[in-house]
Amino acid sequence: MPKIASKLREIANLLDEQKANPFRVNAYLNAAKTIEKMPEPVEDLLKREGFPALLDIPGIGEGIARSVNEFVVTGRMSRLESLQTGHDPVALFEQIPGIGPRSAHRIIETLHIDSLEALELAAHNGRLKQVPGFSTKKIDLVQTWLAHVLGYRRPRPEPQQAIAEPPVGLLLKIDEQYRKKAGAGELPTIAPKRFNPGGEAWLPIMHTTRQGWHFSALYSNTARAHQLDRVQDWVVIFFYDDRHREGQHTVVTETRGPGTGQRVVRGREKECSDYYSAHAVKAMP
């Protein structure tokens, strides 16, 4: 139990250093205090009553509850690792039954995601089907494992009904704002754990709230981005809302096809094309 509270405090401290929303910082601090004062270990509560029992604890919202459940099940808290930009996404996905190194690399290269929440969203929104080797049966297995680890089973959407995400226009505006502020040196910087042997605080990070969505944006610090020299082109945007719908997208400069040179949201290229077409029509005299 002290370890879980300590992890939540680490998240709060990182968010505070990165100038995130104070309410979000306080939510993690209050959750840590609550867990420390519980009369029994939270692990025992989970084993006895399951994930819904976490939501009955005052001050524990669904997002924090999912992180606690993940830590109890796997021994890691990927939300913290993402904030530290120190986790290996291949190792993260390899822990899922049926996903080996090749499948993990395909997920990352096809969808540009590196968190369990983003993978869960991709599985339910149909984008995981774009990854070679992922049949309907395999996707169902992934969803079942994620529901167990994240502690929450999304209701299966009706056909043609997608789980809510920020519109691509908003994601593109967040991308533009981030790159402009990062280029002007107006953002706090963090020292990522990966690919940073000198421990230099070089990676700009931006937290902002728009249209009811809370965003964290930063340049991609993945192995692939470094290999292709795209670190300062690929922008990773994490998002969540007050209903704890959360996920992640990467915005890149398109290098092929009719959209060459445009900023596009990986996995939502068709929506981006429609967005640009609509705005081009509006801009016409």
Image: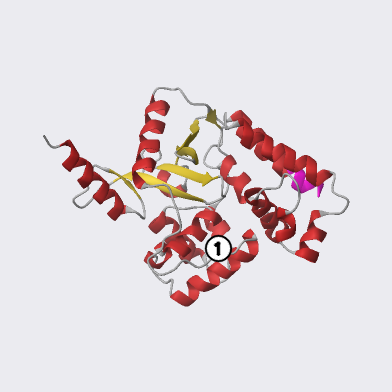
Residue appearing at x 36%, y 51% in the figure = 266
- Give the number of marks: 1
Q: Using residue 10 as the reference point, say whether residue 41 is left or right of it.
A: right
- Which of the 4 quarters of the picture holds residue 116? bottom right
Q: Which residue is mark 1?
A: 154
Magenta segment boundaries in residue numbering = 1-6
Residue appearing at x 79%, y 40% in the figure = 33
Magenta highlight on residue 4: yes
> Which of 275 and 225 lies nearest the eye of the viewer?
275
Rendered location of residue 215, percent (x, y): 49, 39
> Which of 21 and 90 lies nearest the eye of the viewer?
21
- The three-letter amino acid code for the residue at tag 1 is Arg
Residue appearing at x 69%, y 57% in the figure = 69
Residue appearing at x 29%, y 49% in the figure = 272
The secondary structure type at the circle numbered 1 is loop
Characterize the local packing of mark 1: few (<14), some (14-19) or many (20 or more) Cα atoms within 10 angstroms.
few
Above or below 285: residue 117: below
Rendered location of residue 155, percent (x, y): 54, 65
Rendered location of residue 58, percent (x, y): 75, 46
The dominant secondary structure in magenta is helix
On the question of residue 230 being in view, the answer is: no
- Which of the 4 quarters of the picture holds residue 22? top right
Query: Which corner quadrant holds the C terminus?
Result: top left
State the residue lying farthest toward the left: 285
Rendered location of residue 79, percent (x, y): 60, 47
> Which of 141 and 213 lies nearest the eye of the viewer?
213
Magenta highlight on residue 61: no
Above or below 18: residue 165: below
Above or below 214: residue 202: above
On the question of residue 233 being in view, the answer is: yes
